[in-house]
Image (cartoon, rainbow, N blue to C red):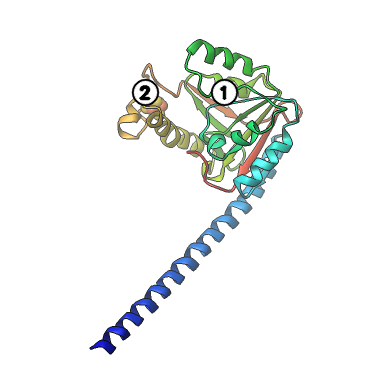
Amino acid sequence: MKTTAITNCGCFFAITRIIRNFAYHFTTHTMNIKETRNARLGATMVKNLERRHFEAHYCPTRQEAIELINTLIADGSSVTWGGSMTIRDMGLLDSLRRRPSLMLLDREGLTDREEIEALYREAFACDVFLTSANAISEDGVLVNIDGNGNRVAAITWGPRRVIHVIGMNKVAQDVKAALKRARSTAAPTNATRFDIKTPCQTDGACHNCNSPQCICNYIHLLRNSNGANRHVVVLVGEELGY
Ligand code: SF4
């Protein structure tokens, strides 16, 4: 009886070990496939973006992206950013806050509407504006939607350089798919995040609303970079933002 129990116990541990090894190898294999796919598509997209006169980079990880972006921002620069889960959650803002030579226009902690709007206006005179995108097509068109318009306004004109940091999860096959992603994934998620009373906040789907709270008042396509590399796109081979 005792021998059987020991044998059963040995079998149990052996099977557990096999399952664990299988799960580990399966997960690692899947991750490698995803990384390889992202790197290949990222390389193609860099070429497509360069044809549109963007400065473009592909970074496999957020850490590499943070290091690269810090080299793109010279000491003494004034820097600000649009509302973005990507640039906050990847740790980019924290890394900039550790550089005392930078002049950061940081709206974190501001609640007064007038102060926030004053900062939006100051953003136009900044050296560097950081943002993500709601989606990007494989051929290099960036799609953004905006409720206030301050983010898409600063992308369009003002700051000397705009650095767009975009996780590969935001890549869509073409512009139509990118617009669909922005409207049906990014906007409802943002409405939920800020508890904005829009129809998409209640059921997660876009209703093409004309609500006073609508966060899709401006739909912006950036298809070509004007000026000498004013726009820099940094693609990151990780899931960032939504
Ligand atoms: S329901 Fe309105 S706010 Fe929500 S995604 Fe659609 S247009 Fe935008």
Report which quarter residue 97 is drawn in.
top right
In the image, 179 versus 55, the foreground residue is 55
In the rendered structure, the answer to whether residue 203 lies left or right of residue 88 reads left
Can you say whether 81 is above or below 44 in the image?
A: above
Identify the amino acid type marked 1.
Val
Residue 152 shows which numbered tag? 1
Quadrant of picture, ligand 1: top left
How far is disc 2 from disc 1 in space, using C-alphas?
A: 20 Å
Identify the amino acid type marked 2.
Cys
Hey, which residue is sitting farthest top in the picture?
114
Can you say whether 77 is above or below 25 in the image?
A: above
Whether residue 81 is visible, yes or no, is yes
In the image, 23 versus 58, the foreground residue is 23
Spot occupied by residue 31 in the image (x, y as percentages of width and height) = 53, 58
- What residue does disc 2 label? 209
The residue at the point 39 percent across, 79 percent down is 14
Residue 77 shows which numbered tag? none
Q: Is mark 2 within 8 Å of ligand 1?
A: yes
The residue at the point 60 percent across, 45 percent down is 62
